Amino acid sequence: MKKIPVEKIEDNMVLDREVCGTGGNTLLTKGTILSRALGRRLQNWGIAYVYVQGEEEFQQEESVVTVSPEDLMRHLSEKFANVMDNPYMQKICNAVYHYRLNKSGK
Amino acid sequence: MPLQILQTIENISSIPTLPTVIERLTRLLQNPKTSAEEVGKAITTDQALAAKVLKLVNSAFYGFPGRISTITHAIVILGFSTVKNIVLTASIFDVFRNKGEGITGFDLEDFWLHSIACGAASAAIAKQIGGLEKEECFIAGLIHDLGKLILCHYLPDEFLSALQHSAENRQLLYESEKQLFDSTHAQIGGYISERWNLPLSLQNPVKYHHQPSPTHEHYLMTAVVHFADILVRALDYGNGGDNQIPSLSEQVWKSLDMEKIDLDALLGSIHAEIEKASVFIQWT
């Protein structure tokens, strides 16, 4: 796995770690075949670095946005605000919170 | 569907159709004597489509990476039904590819990411509960918001007003559409899927994904897509045009036997299925 700035993305590079946006949403999944055009889109989304397959060449700061538990809770509370009176939606919200928290911690 | 919107859509001659190979395949597959060679020949009449089908067959999504070199081989390995579903999936992407940038408040890249993720999540849920064809569930999830694409491309003013109304009132886009023009993307998508002669098992999840009811045929698949849509929204895979989340009914929860399912494991398998579906991202 190597970490490269998005402007260095070349056609046919393969993403080795998913790319998340600022809200923690997944923009691209691991295994996506990249292109320069996709690199430009990532720049538009505010992504600075990505992990691609290959030998490590760059030593930069973390590029994957990690969401804090408080931000994630706030985000999900807002998203589920209209449905939290439903016990099944409470279960889903709770499961998603723990799942996303564990995933971002890995 | 209210007459006005139906008539407007009926009168738009540029609404795309699916390639004729789909109908030919459906006819061929209804005949039990049809051979793999005949189906292979029908698919390869469209070389571009055949190439896409081979690319899909050899992707991690279908589990045979880099080992299938001909359509006939694919049919022998995967079976008629799966190959037909792969052809249908490739055709659906073809129909809407390169259709422009979308409109304000509706990013097509986010939309496709949401749709692909919903397809992958539907497949993962189907695998978990059993009894449904995984590939068909993927397509049902993939096209559940077909009506939004029709609205975006052919009725952009109406769609924009619904997007704005939904954002201002913090409610589902579906509810805003109903309030503003008494018609929803689910109904419009259902109408188009009917016009495309898609099987009822795909039409109904498109038509009823916001209101699954056991009174409709293919209720279970519709319930799977409804649940997949909710989970994909909660996981923030892409965006279908609003930032709200539909409410899951007790009936759907019980129909899917959710008490017996480990939600955390299900979310993990959804994520794995979405990773495998990344082959589709480059097509949008």
Image (tube, rainbow, N blue to C red):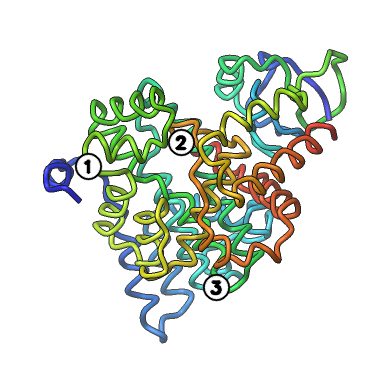
Between A68 and B141, which is closer to the camera in this rendering?
A68
The residue indicated by pointer 3 is B79
Chain name for mark 1: B
Q: Of the residues tagged 2 and 1, which is closer to the observer?
A: 1
For marks 1 and 3, the one nearer the N-term is: 3
**In terms of image quadrants, where is residue B130?**
bottom right
Residue B62 is labelled as none
Q: Amino acid at mark 3?
A: Gly
Q: CA distance from mark 2 to mark 1?
A: 20 Å
The image shows residue B278, relative to residue A9, as above or below, that is below
Tag 2 and tag 1 share a subunit: yes
Between B89 and A26, which is closer to the camera in this rendering?
A26
Residue B13 seen by the camera: yes
Chain name for mark 3: B
Tag 1 and tag 3 share a subunit: yes
For marks 2 and 1, the one nearer the N-term is: 1
* Residue A64: image location, x then y, percent: 75, 23
Q: Residue at x 50, y 47 (%)?
A: B247
* Residue B111: image location, x then y, percent: 46, 35
Residue B240 is labelled as 2
Q: CA distance from mark 1 to mark 3?
A: 42 Å
The image shows residue A95, relative to residue B208, as above or below, that is above
